[in-house]
């Protein structure tokens, strides 16, 4: 396993896409070296974006969280979330009726365009289930799992409306060795019980990559897909998605993939990054 | 779809296996005709067994519940549960150490042979996780889902011990149109997150069928597999399992499969019962 | 099931995307009404594209085939194939070494950018397997299945290189009631045996939709996603992909989905088109 | 990883079940030490059976093959095949009509009870497809894959009859590093295309274990499940099946699992043998 220094790789690319959790920060706070790397990209005039599978907060709220952690230079426009892709879908395809959501009220406020049309799914009255125009999985928090999961399954058995999963992640880390089941995992359970196809947003899907590239080119850059380096800690989201999009990919070992299991995971999944780096720290 | 009268079919067989829920009883109580059918089998000296995917109660408790509902003649020895198969496994293969269970204390008492060795999985101390010798999914009740599911996943990430699923059912009916996620559904979620193979007990697996047949032959009957009629309401457990075992199978339309969706489900799954009957009511 | 006349729907959209097989043509030739519909779009100045999961032929060859069938007005630039997406990936991500392909020599010539670097996978010498830089599934024809599938599996066991599936379709129709296993089905078999993640191109993935939209906007149109109507015969490719992209979708009943099974398939998959039309014939 | 000597383990058990391929023999012939181990069991009066996922040959033919390889003492009655389980199913459940098979004529002759009722599936006439009473996957040899797989899929689209898979193995070794797709792999492909549930026979299913145990007890032994040691080279068939049956299990490293990947496979699958031994050679 050839481990490269990120400093030697960055200059070869015209734009950098970062994953957030496991790359820039983790459960303990910032990952060492973030500020330097962000500053360095500014110095060499290489634009960047942060692509995160998250539907619990807005771009503004994501940016504020980085500032609270002490990082300068990650503005709302730098952040692309899977929640934004879900919101875009709802804007284009779901115009009328109530939206039933699974998640916190705050997530609904941030992600759903017209929050007044939205109710927690446990408030769906089965007698009037046909008023529902879409069901959206936003977050694993904000509800009692037993009541909400069962009410979701029973709602799905009554109405055939689009079901949107605004974050495909199955688990997320909450401590060094501990994880929590994430939105994507809860949605997958419901999907398997009702045997339907839900609409899922987030890496490895190409939509967030396209959005970030279009956004940069809309601001005057003239980027091809292989001008981009995607830096991530997870093979089957960041690296698989980046590879398929046609970007170059760098795996960092500060999150889901460790120095110990990296080669094994690469060999057993067939998902091969272009580079492997210890972290985003410029050495 | 050729619907037959159960009265015309029963006399051709030397033993009858019934599923319980959806065949003998449902969320409202007894299904009409049960007592007559049980009495008729006694009259014509055809033995029967009740094969149920359930790990929340003992044989005795199952028999008592039938008596409370007003049925005479279903004794503890008539009942075969998936929980019994799990208990047999634990007896043969897991001898030492603590068993961590997901379910009610009552289920643990009924199903686990030596209840003193068992603790609810949320009581597993990660520092001493290696004391655990097996993990057993018993029931969907008796715990907070979020806390228990997450603690189960994090325990599974620490220890590689046998994981036993004592009831494979994914959902169970709680009202005319409503279901609740069952033990098997919760176990399948955990299995998919940790990517391991759990050991699952219950129909369609052949173990309950073998157990019931061996039990009858041990009492002096001399039955071949095709002397048996399995009567059930669910294609992918009762009928698939009965067919594969080599028994004859009858689908009744008083539970999961209705007159409206029976043909569609048979055609789309490829699971074909030998007979279809409206119910077990002798007409 | 509300069946609409396509004539009433088309004028509401600023661009039309057609699937090819089952919409414009089938195993017997053209589907009635194609020329009229193409001409009508020209009259009302609505641009169109043909999005087809096919990696056996070039845009030029696809266009010529329509002309041979008697259709005027479908030029090479109108056609977007999954093979083009795969070629784009190879251009961006795979630069050196030999490409091993599964399919006809003609498909390799059409789809692979630099045909000289490509060999049929059966010609891979296991002693020099590391010379291979990518494996590409192109077509179900052009080889003996037993020899090629086994050689592919044994090559995959030796090298961990990107595997590209240039057409995700599992089956394709060859006569009124008959199908043939397609490239996607053969690739899925290999994927399941070696337990790796292949990179798959074709609807429902959003890449072909993005490509066609970018192409139109690059020619001076100013289209939003919901200005587009995707017309297709298959729920889990055309309709699911179109819906997720944010386009409007119309299901036609001249291919994989029939008037008889449409409602059932919609209900059982949860993939709901915005419109259902008998065919693309303007009535 | 604690590697034990098989000599120290055997005496603790009252019966031994061996897998065949990868335990007693491989592509090069016999595995060293087989004759000694068989003789040793005879000396200490411990009965044994050979449980093999194979539907291409009869018990007699399997026994003769061992004799050709130079082994004495493995008689036809010692051998239990997945093909026998499939034959038993056909006897109990499929009485009339034609059986269409996928495999060699020889396999059909060995496995199908009444060979006169059987035809290769390519001979099924779609006009008279309803004459077929069952479809049986026997072997990966004896037919052109393209023609037969496509004819099988098109037959399955016309008739809804029991489909029996007489060997669940997905691949089998043909040389040191090379495998061939097996019957189970071909059946799984067809199953995924037609989305039906086939009936599969072979380890890890408990039927072969039950059969062998009943057979021994029928000959006067008085064995419990945990009196048996299952020795195999494959975690997800021999060891998973043996464990679930309640037998003790020993993994040998002379076949699918090697000293290099054993610990990794055990950890990643959660299938844990009771013992690990280098081979069946008595040291």
Image (cartoon, coloured by chain):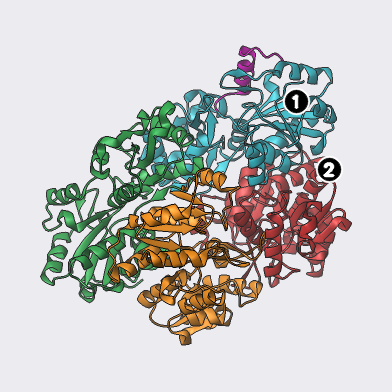
Chain colours: A orange, B red, C green, D cyan
Q: Determine if residue C221 is in view.
A: yes
In the image, A18 versus A180, the foreground residue is A18
Look at the image and give the residue range highlighted in magenta: D56-74
In the image, B224 versus C131, the foreground residue is C131
CB atoms at circles 2 and 1 under 8 Å apart? no
Which residue has dot 1 on it?
D48
State which mark lies toward you, 2 or 1. Answer: 1
- Quick one: which residue is furthest to the bottom in this view? A116
Measured along the vertical axis of the image, is residue D66 above or below residue B279? above
In the image, A11 versus B124, the foreground residue is A11
Secondary structure type for disc 1: strand
Q: Residue A46 in the image: x percent, y percent?
A: 37, 64
Q: Looking at the image, which residue is at 54% across and 50% down?
A: B271
Which residue has dot 2 on it?
B219
| Quadrant in the picture for the C terminus of chain D | top right
Q: Residue B221 in the image: x percent, y percent?
A: 79, 41
Q: Is residue A173 left or right of residue A252?
A: right
Assess disc 1: are there few (<14), some (14-19) or many (≥20) residues with their C-alpha within 10 Å of its C-alpha.
Answer: many
Q: Looking at the image, which residue is at 46% across and 58% down?
A: A231
Occupied quadrant, residue D61: top right
| Quadrant in the picture for the N terminus of chain D | top right
Q: Is residue D65 magenta?
A: yes
Q: Residue A224 in the image: x percent, y percent?
A: 30, 58
Q: CA distance from mark 2 to mark 1?
A: 28 Å
């Amino acid at each position: 396993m050839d481990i490269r220094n990120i400093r030697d790789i960055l200059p070869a690319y015209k734009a950098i896409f970062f994953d957030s959790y496991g790359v820039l920060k983790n459960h303990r706070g910032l990952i060492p070296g973030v500020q330097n790397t962000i500053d360095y990209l500014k110095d060499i005039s290489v634009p960047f974006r942060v692509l995160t599978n998250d539907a619990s907060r807005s771009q503004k709220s994501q940016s504020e969280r980085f500032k609270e952690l002490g990082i300068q230079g990650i503005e709302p426009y730098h952040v692309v979330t899977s929640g934004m892709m879900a919101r875009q879908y709802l804007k284009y395809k779901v115009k009328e009726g109530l939206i039933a959501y699974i998640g916190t009220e705050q997530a609904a406020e941030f992600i759903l365009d017209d929050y007044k049309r939205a109710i927690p799914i446990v408030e769906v009255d089965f007698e009037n289930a046909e008023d529902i125009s879409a069901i959206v999985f936003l977050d694993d928090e904000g509800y009692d799992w037993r009541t909400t999961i069962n009410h979701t399954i029973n709602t799905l058995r009554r109405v055939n409306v689009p079901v949107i999963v605004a974050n495909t992640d199955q688990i997320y880390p909450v401590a060094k060795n501990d994880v929590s089941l994430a939105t994507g995992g809860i949605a997958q359970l419901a999907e398997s019980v009702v045997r339907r196809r839900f609409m899922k947003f987030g890496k490895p899907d190409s939509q967030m990559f396209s959005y970030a590239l279009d956004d940069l080119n809309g601001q005057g850059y003239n980027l091809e897909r292989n001008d981009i380096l995607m830096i991530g800690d997870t093979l089957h989201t960041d690296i698989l998605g980046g590879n398929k999009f046609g970007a170059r990919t760098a795996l960092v070992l500060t999150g889901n993939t460790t120095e110990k299991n990296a080669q094994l995971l690469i060999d057993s999944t067939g998902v091969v990054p272009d580079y492997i780096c210890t972290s985003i720290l410029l050495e």
